[in-house]
Amino acid sequence: MWARTNCGVTVRASAICRRWFELHFTGRTWRPPYEANSVIIQATSGCTYKKCRFCSLYKDECFRMSPMEEFEEDLAEIKSYQPYARRIFWTGANPFAMSYENLKLRALTVRDYLIKCQTMAMFASIRDIRDKEVWQLKKLRAMGINGLTIGTESGDDGTLELAGKGYTAADILEQCRKLDEAGIEYYFVYMTGLAGKGRGYWNAVNSAELFSQLNPYFISVDSLTLFPDTELYRMEQEGQFAPAGEKERLEELQVFIKNLQIRMHLFANSSSNFYPVTAYLPKERNLVASELQHIMDTVSEDEMAEYRRNLKSLG
């Protein structure tokens, strides 16, 4: 529905509507695949952290909250063509970094314009939850803020440190338990290969053990792809980081699935995954593990590595 745009550029909202709408988008506009049917609005741009060693998505952008005037103008435009929208996705690397008062103001403003809106989803970091009390989270949930995509990437302390995430497994546990208590739905992102060569097994075991103590609605799995403008790529070039092989990544995913002890959906079907799989756990655990084993037994490491080398982006 939406195109990447710069501020002031008109974008076509829908071919059905047969009219043009002006919306304010600055910098890189990114949303998860599963938010494809959500209405999108810019709440922030850029990232508050920009220290993850595998990521360069927002490295050249300063974090910025959309002015309320622009936010309301965009809501008015959205209302003009989709007044009964039920789910809206706020863009930006981590809009949940905004203070409770700012989130509250914007959530209530959305409700003023979109009276049928039930859910306001967005990216969030573990760091963004720390400064919010459970009572505040409960109020935000009551206003419609729900569906937080959290790029945990791992639940293993060594891997989190290597990736430069800026928090520990204990932090993930503490902060997400607050979301559980508040009734806020959240989704984890896990990244195979992030621990490096020879460390995938323990990354999978420790991450699965941690995640099994929480209640993510689903887990989305990516596989590490090193791009030249990232810190981890530089470390690899200088011999400070040895990437995991492709079969080791599939083994890691297999171990991760086998050790998860919660009922949930798992999606490992992004372009970064050589072999896309989806599973409802624990029901389809053995089936997916067998699929992965078949790929490891029948496809060469070279063929998998060639696929990774040809990935130019993850968009």
Image: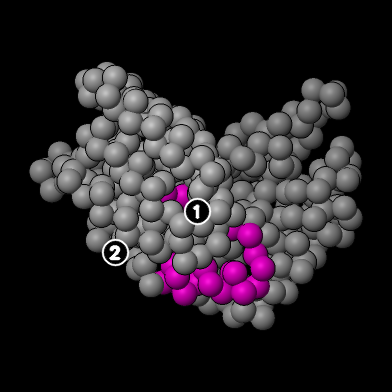
Residue drawn at the location 55% of the way across and 54% of the way down: 263
Disc 2 residue crowd, few under 14, some 14–19, many 20+, Cα 10 Å: some
Between residue 261 and residue 13, name the one nearer to us. Answer: 261
Residue 139 in the image: state x and y as whole percent.
Answer: 73, 74
Colour setting = one colour
145 inside magenta stretch: no
Residue 158 x/y as whole percent: 24, 61
Give SS at disc 1: strand
Q: Relative to 253, is 117 above or below?
A: below
Magenta highlight range: 171-190
Q: Is residue 61 visible?
A: no
Residue that badge 2 annotates: 157
Q: Residue 5: x percent and y percent?
A: 62, 35
Residue 144, x across and y down, in percent: 75, 62
Where the N terminus falls, by quadrant? top right
Identify residue for label 1.
Answer: 188
